Image (spheres, rainbow, N blue to C red):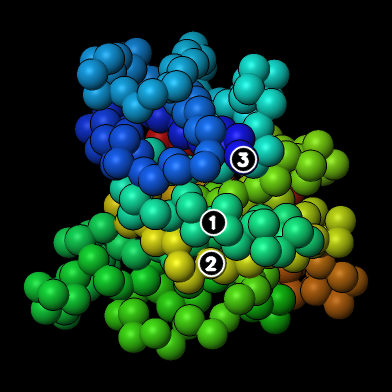
């Protein structure tokens, strides 16, 4: 019997969290022991969930400050490791819902691939939350990719989701490995966290999952895409949605930080050119992000 701890970070998005927990109540847990840790990450109003809506073995942890995606997840992982000693940690965004068999499929994939350090599922946009929802039929909605594995493009300093905004026609089903796993939903064996640690808190929000993936790969583990496991994602439910000021700032700053940290000497000139272009021609938030990266001002910042 595998022991799995699910970590969910909640921030001012009660409805999304309740829907996520409701979907977890229906998960197939046969042969597994499952505990859920919800980190209320400094929400304006403390998260309160009626007992009848809580899945079994659910713990709500309250942080008085917003620790970001990085330290919020780290807090949940530490608590899980101290209290239930799981074999696996599953990080799950609060703005997701899951297929009842997603957990069983992820564990099956992990057990069949002992060298896997991270296993991520197939992730669709939640029905109606697609970038171009009007382009799809009613039957196609809910089957449009948000993530079908991840690729890192060093030439263009980009880490992107494969298949994003494409209808699933089975064309990614042959892919088994990934350059990075998304923190939206990823299964990580405990031994991997014991070896490399959790998220780097300097990111606070965005691209911390790519950083963790780089460390996992450097430690000799593979990163897998498990097509049999399926979830749905509302996309940036706690940060104002795609294109928000929060997303724009942290994506820009952390992108520069990530590629500087892991890039080789030949990439550094590209990074500097990109940073200069943003500083001279970018938005106010992009210029602020470049400046903060340049002087090493990381972690949480006042964006608005």
Q: Is residue 46 above or below residue 123?
A: above
Q: Mark on residue 226?
A: 2
Q: What residue do we see at 67% from left, 70% from top? A: 179
- Residue 223 as seen in the image, left or right of residue 106: right
Q: What residue do we see at 34% from left, 74% from top? A: 165
Q: Quadrant of residue 52?
A: top left
Q: Is residue 81 above or below residue 231?
A: above
Which residue lies under the disc numbered 3?
A: 2
- Marks 3 and 2, Cα distance to the nearest angstrom? 18 Å
**Dot 3: element:** strand
**Residue 263: image x %, image y %?**
81, 67
Q: Are marks 1 and 2 in contact (CB under 8 Å)?
A: yes
Answer with mark 3 or mark 2, whichever residue precedes in sequence: 3
Q: Nearer the viewer, residue 93 or 87?
A: 87
Q: Quadrant of the N terminus?
A: top right
Residue furthest toward the right? 265
């Amino acid at each position: 019997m595998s022991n799995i701890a699910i970590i969910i970070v909640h921030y001012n998005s009660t409805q999304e969290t309740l829907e996520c927990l409701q979907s977890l109540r229906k998960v197939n847990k046969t042969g597994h022991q499952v505990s859920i840790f919800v980190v209320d990450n400094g929400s304006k109003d403390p998260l309160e969930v009626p007992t009848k809506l809580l899945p079994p073995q659910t713990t709500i942890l309250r942080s008085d400050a917003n620790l970001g995606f990085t330290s919020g997840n780290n807090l949940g992982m530490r608590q899980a490791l101290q209290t239930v000693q799981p074999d696996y940690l599953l990080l799950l965004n609060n703005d997701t819902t899951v297929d009842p068999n997603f957990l069983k499929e992820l564990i099956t994939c992990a057990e069949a691939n002992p060298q896997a350090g991270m296993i991520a599922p197939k992730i669709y946009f939640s029905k109606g939350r697609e970038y171009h929802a009007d382009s799809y039929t009613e039957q196609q909605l809910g089957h449009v990719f948000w993530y079908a594995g991840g690729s890192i493009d060093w030439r263009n300093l980009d880490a992107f989701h494969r298949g994003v905004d494409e209808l699933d026609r089975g064309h990614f089903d042959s892919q088994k490995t990934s350059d990075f796993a998304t923190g939206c939903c990823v299964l990580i064996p405990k031994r991997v966290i014991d070896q490399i640690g959790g998220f780097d808190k300097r990111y606070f929000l965005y691209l911390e999952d790519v950083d963790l993936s780089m460390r996992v790969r450097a430690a000799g583990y593979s990163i897998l895409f498990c097509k049999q496991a399926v979830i749905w994602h509302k996309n940036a439910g706690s940060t104002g949605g795609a294109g928000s000021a929060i997303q724009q700032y942290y994506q820009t700053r952390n992108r520069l930080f990530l590629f500087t940290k892991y890039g080789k000497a030949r990439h550094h000139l590209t990074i500097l050119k990109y940073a200069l272009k943003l500083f001279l021609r970018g938005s106010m938030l992009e210029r602020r992000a470049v400046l903060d990266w340049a002087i090493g001002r990381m972690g949480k910042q006042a964006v608005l």
